[in-house]
Amino acid sequence: MKNIKNLERKQNCTGKTLSPPFRSSVLAMSLVGVVTTAPSFAQNVLEEVIVSATKRAESIQDVPVSVSAVTGDQIQGLGIVDMEDLSLYVPGFEINSTSVVPNLYIRGLGGGLTHSIEQSVGRYVDGVYIGRAVINTHGFMDVASVEVLRGPQGTLFGKNTLAGALILRTAEPTETFAAGLDVSAGDYSTRGSNMEMQGFIAGPITDSLSARLAVRYREDDSFYTNHLEGPDGTDRTDEGVRLKLNWAVSDQFLASLKLEHAEYQYDGADTAEIPNLSRGTLEQYQAFAPNFTPELDYDIFVDCTDTFANVDGERINTGSYCPGREQEYNNVTLKLEYDIDAGTFTSISAYQDYEYEYRFNAVDGGLAQAFKADRDEEYSGFSQELRFTSAADEKFDYILGLYYEDSDLERFQASDFNFTDLFGSPPFLGRSEPWEQETTSWAAFGQLRWSFTDDLTMIFGGRYADEEKDFAFERFFRDYGSDVPNGQPGGPGGPALAVEDSRSEDKFTGSITAQWDISEDAMLYASFSQGHKTGGFSDRIDNPNADFQFDEETNDAFEIGAKTTWLDGTLAFNIAIYHMSIDDLQAAAATRDSDGIAVFSVINAAEATSQGVEMDFVWSANEWLTLGGNYAYTDATFDSFPGAECPPDAVPDPDGTCSLDGRPLAFAPENKGTLYADLYFQDAMSEWDLKFHVDASYTDDAWSNITYFPVELTESHTVYNASLGVVSPSEKYSFLLLGRNLTEEEYCIWCLDGGPASLAKPREVVLKLTARFD
């Protein structure tokens, strides 16, 4: 979804507004999808969309990179509350929506189902690299814009981005007083409801100091129905607050400080369904939940009351247990900008931390304690970026930067296994896994843009990075529900062990881009860029002799594209064709050990390729109608991947493993696209304006795991959304009625064989009030 534009109040070429009868008839035809227009091209020039993809404020039509941009107004108008909602509208962009590790994917490349792999898609908020994927579980608050850059972006960012970058900017303090309030209430078609309030107040404190305070509160009691004694899905509450201060120390020097805190908590199971009974029989499950079926149906069976186990002929009360999560996140960012004639010096210092306590289980069917786990994780990181951006020049300009980051990560997971009632046999014990990692990295990066002629520009970039990691992992076994090691040498997942290791690596990556401005309305570009993601250590280790260290991943990407404007500035059409060769792809997969226990392991696949086409268009047909859409074709496959777990339809090699050559990567739908229409009618109801939006988003089949069990395939689906709103004559107040997933497409957004699984949201209807004051 690129360049989606809310049309301003406009007049036709005669200077008169359209008559109410005409507006009403057009709206009626639009509602059934029949629109005929005679556009007046000269009166409907598209608004310019400004992006920061090149670390300079430039028109999206002038930057030689495949990028999608969504404004804060569009986020509000489409009812986007988080990354999962955003991914529906952006071509080539996906998210695996698990609250444990919600990794972002671009063109089929992402972090996978593990805590140990670095992110392939870098997320930057107000210029700061967000160090861990779990921070993506917090929703959007007072967002000014989001940009999704596809392909490696290492030469302009301190932390390299192998597959792409997501740039999020929050709203800034204003020089005059401004305030706003957004209130919404929604209902799901299955059960449950949600409500959200966001507000801000901004303005000057002194002649040189301005501020902006934003707050967010959201309640969501889920759309699942639990048929046993426990919460219905996740009963979740989100809270957030952000303070931004801008101090104009002088005409040349600007200091900005951001203080942010966000937290959420919920009770209930976020991924609770079992889509396939790979272990046991239906009768075994129904002994604990008579109405249980292994279907994806918004019905779950999570028992949070006392449960029991038969151990050595004795019936033992194992106590009560209920899944849930509490998470807090903090960010402090200090940005200093100093202008001189030659350019701008920028310093960005940031500290971020989070901690969470997560209680989860992996078995539906009333067996909340067949497998239960408590995971506590703490992270803290400091980063410093120094950058000089030269003044714009007709001949050449450049950007030079240094980046430093130091982070500490600690995780403790305690798992308890109680399969005695389900299978009549062990395991019945506990396992603990402390895990620590310290990371220090620094990088030097730069880019030179040289205009050889008025029409031809070359851009050269490079980045040198150095990183060190220190790692420690321990596993010991204990009695069920106990905190004390029992000295047992083995159990589910392998023997007791303790390992420590460290690694260091350095890498240079480069890029070169040719940009040819054919005319004022058309630009062609061709680029070669390299991406790099550091190696690391697996957060699950099977035995002391296991190779738990994995190597770096690299990406060589070629891209050609065109950005064009037509029909006197009313139509924009962009296209990009790319080919990416990935070596030593870091693959995380859920496999099963000899006891049938799910194990998440990390190995380097030898080679993979991602190639495809991305395109988008937006057309301001006339003063009240805008049409647009986007499309991505993605062919992302393993070229060579020996030694992997065998899919169910494969014949094992003599060593019991299989090669995944030719198989698709996870979260890489082959076809994905969106079509939308925006209508804006001035003075449609007395002096109130009327606006209407409708979109249809199609996503092809895609795998959520590379073990390729049939249940792990998310089937193709089309999601229809629409909204109808009214805007007051002053444009300070608006009411919006949103309908999301109107046809109730039911599909799995994250499924593993034997569970857990998570369904997409059912139909949701939201009523929203927006008020602005100045």
Image (cartoon, helix red, strand yellow):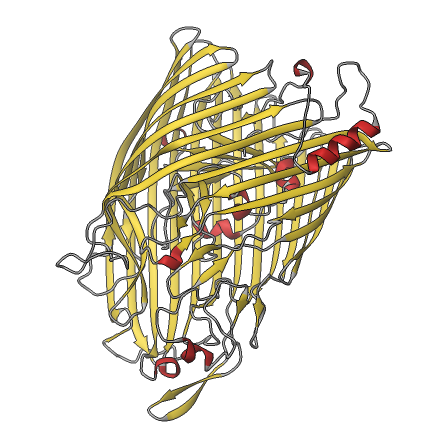
Q: Nearer the viewer, residue 584 or 90?
A: 90
Residue 699, horizontal then vertical, whole percent: 47, 44
State the residue lying farthest toward the bottom: 313
Residue 707 visible in this rendered orientation of the protein: yes
**Looking at the figure, which quarter contains the N terminus?**
top right
Residue 359, horizontal then vertical, whole percent: 47, 67
Q: How many marks?
A: 0
In the image: residue 342, left or right of residue 528: right
Work out whether 435 lies above or below 310. Answer: above
In the image: residue 125, left or right of residue 556: right
**Looking at the figure, which quarter contains the C terminus?**
top right
Quarter assignment of residue 684: top right
State the residue lying farthest toward the top: 453
Q: Identify the residue shown where x is 33% and y is 73%.
A: 431
Residue 406, horizontal then vertical, whole percent: 38, 45
Q: Identify the residue shown where x is 46% and y is 52%.
A: 134
Work out whether 670 lies above or below 276. Answer: above
Residue 621, horizontal then vertical, whole percent: 65, 23
